[in-house]
Amino acid sequence: MEFDDENLAHRIGARLGTLRAERSLTLDGLAELSGVSRAMISRVERGEASPTAALLARLCSALGVSLSVFFAAGGAEVSPLARRADQPVWRDPESGYLRRVVAPGGTGSRVDVVEVEFPAGAEVRFPGQQASRSQWQHVWLFEGEMDLTVGETVHRLLPGDCLFMNVGDVHGFRNPTDKPARYAVIIDLGHR
DNA sequence: GATCTTTGCGCGTGGGCAAA
DNA sequence: TTTGCCCACGCGCAAAGATC
């Protein structure tokens, strides 16, 4: 379920607007919570800008949802089975990394499962977010190599390695090799 | 071929304006 | 007064061109 860029930008914008409205937040309110300017939020909601992974993470954190919840199709039929063809896929316009929400949406589960294909040489950094401190994640590498930075510590992950970390910590993902990497992220969403 | 400079593009921000 | 949108600008990055 991969969308073309324009369609995806509009879907993200609509989803962002819905979540913001559900929380009775104004552009200013969300801007204050997320640290993203209200002009940028407005452009994203109108589908005029494609948010980067880092920016989207800040907005999701401010809204109190995970990226998985964000990309889960609102109102979609709830099923315990998520076929690969139906799993939401999003590509970060900045790094090119591909994020696939594997776990079925709308089940009420407090655990999300995400598959990531990370391009060679790419890097993504996520700022620390107080709103995400109740969330934890396992990063389980299948193929390639990844450098994961948590705070000041850099962890080199090899196939089979698994790193446990707090989602709210300042962290970064980097593929130092010339081959793409593939890994899974299992997220404990904590109390919602 | 390597290095430096220029140019173009996209992302993101701040300030200001108009409508309700 | 609040809210959402528009405009101008800065910044970073990659591609193209120039120079050695």
Image (cartoon, coloured by chain):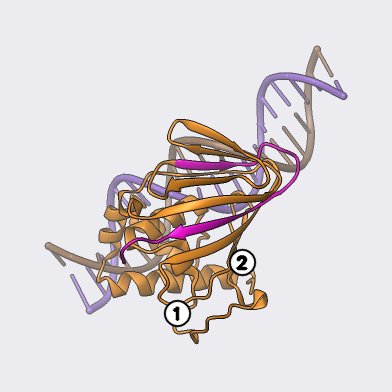
Chain colours: A orange, B purple, C brown
Q: Residue at x 31, y 54 (%)?
A: A131
Instruction: Return the residue at label 1.
Output: A74
The answer for how far apart the CA atoms under marks 1 and 2 are is 19 Å
Can residue A46 be seen here? The reply is no
Q: Nearer the viewer, mark 1 or mark 2?
A: 1
**Same chain shared by disc 1 and disc 2:** yes
Near-viewer residue (A33 or A163): A163
> SS for tag 2?
helix
Question: Residue drawn 42% across and 62% down?
Answer: A66
Q: Is residue A161 above or below residue A90?
A: above
Q: Say which quarter of the image contains residue A98.
A: bottom right
Amino acid type of the residue tagged 1 in the rendering: Gly
Query: Which residue sits at x=39%, y=61%?
Result: A189
Q: Which residue is mark 2?
A: A5
Q: Upstream in the sequence, badge 1 or badge 2?
A: 2
Q: Is residue A151 above or below residue A100?
A: above
Q: Residues within 10 Å of mark 1 (few under 14, many from 20)?
A: few
Residue placed most toward the observer, A135 or A178:
A135
Magenta region: A171-192
Q: Residues within 10 Å of mark 2 (few under 14, many from 20)?
A: some
Residue A187 inside the magenta-drawn segment: yes
In the displayed structure, would residue A30 be above or below residue A85?
above
Query: Which picture quadrant has residue A169?
Result: top left
Quadrant into which the C terminus of chain A falls: bottom left
Q: Is residue A88 above or below residue A63?
A: below
What amino acid does circle 2 point to?
Asp
Q: Position of residue A145 (x, y in %)?
A: 67, 41
Does A84 lie within the magenta span?
no
> Where does residue A10 sit, x and y in percent of width and height?
51, 72
